[in-house]
Amino acid sequence: MESISEQKEFLSELMTMLEKQFPDSEIVLHDYSMPYEHTIVDIRNGHITGRKIGDCLSNFGLEALSGDTEGINRFNYITFLPSAEILRSSSLYFTNSEGKVLGSLCINTNITEEARYEDYLRKKNGFSLSKSENISREVFPGTVHALLEHLITEAQSTIGKDSGSMTKEDKIHFIQLLDQKGALLISKSGERICSYLGISKFTLYKYLDIARGAAKDEKDENE
């Protein structure tokens, strides 16, 4: 496959089959040749996450675009919506002959009621399993602005300080975290990051070079 559009008819039929087979699941097709703000080109049962055609990619999609494509597919993972709804999800990424990510087909099944009933039975029986290790923090924003703000909040939480309290090393680490999540791919993200950290664009790219150099050194050491 060299583009999503060339397989759009087949993928549409595939989505129709999945929609009929799994009527309580959201099925989403992303085309990453589209602007980041509008990667969803087909969606079924979009009420599950509140998205529609023309909305943006998730944080996992952005991450797939920014990093190594090996092993990027994610199957049967759990994620939580802001409404506390629980989803069981799978994401299949399409790449071309050169390994470039073209798009993705994702399935999100709302298992909230099943999970609550399961929890009820475990409590009733006095038995519980250890917390699943397959829980992922995928978010489904309607806009890339909301996605960028989520990534900034997530990175700030990891650092454990507000921007005014961050040292130079903290800010480099902060930028490294955003870079690893693909945040720098978002249009005008640099302006927002500079504003948040209180630094110039020159300083941003200086820190980014340092962060990427450190990440490369760490990768070389682990190989």
Image (tube, rainbow, N blue to C red):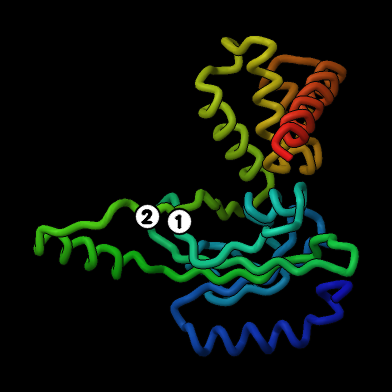
* Direction from residue 92 to residue 158 in the image, left or right: left
- Residue under the point 76% across and 25% down: 214
* Direction from residue 201 to residue 72 in the image, left or right: left
Tell which of 145 and 72 is nearer to you: 72
Tell which of 124 and 213 is nearer to you: 213
Quadrant of the drawing holding the C terminus: top right
Q: Circles 2 and 1: CB distance less than 8 Å? A: yes
- Residue under the point 73% across and 70% down: 41
Quadrant of the drawing holding the N terminus: bottom right
- Residue under the point 59% across and 62% down: 74
Q: What is the crowding at mark 2: few (fewer than 14 residues within 10 Å), some, or many (at least 20)?
A: few
Q: Classify 19 as above or below 100.
A: below
Q: CA distance from mark 2 to mark 1?
A: 5 Å
Where residue 106 appears, x then y in whole percent? 61, 69
- Residue under the point 25% across and 63% down: 116
Where residue 159 appears, x then y in whole percent? 55, 23
Where residue 176 appears, x then y in whole percent? 70, 29
Tell which of 39 and 102 is nearer to you: 102
Where residue 29 appears, x then y in whole percent? 68, 71
Residue at numbered disc 2: 132
Q: What amino acid type is highlighted by mark number 1?
A: Asn
Q: What amino acid type is highlighted by mark number 2?
A: Ser
Q: What is the crowding at mark 1: few (fewer than 14 residues within 10 Å), some, or many (at least 20)?
A: few
Q: Classify 69 as above or below 152.
A: below
Tell which of 121 and 31 is nearer to you: 121
Secondary structure of the residue carrying tag 2 is loop
Secondary structure of the residue carrying tag 1 is loop
Circle number at residue 134: 1
- Location of residue 132 by image quarter: bottom left
Circle number at residue 106: none
Q: Classify 10 as above or below 76.
A: below
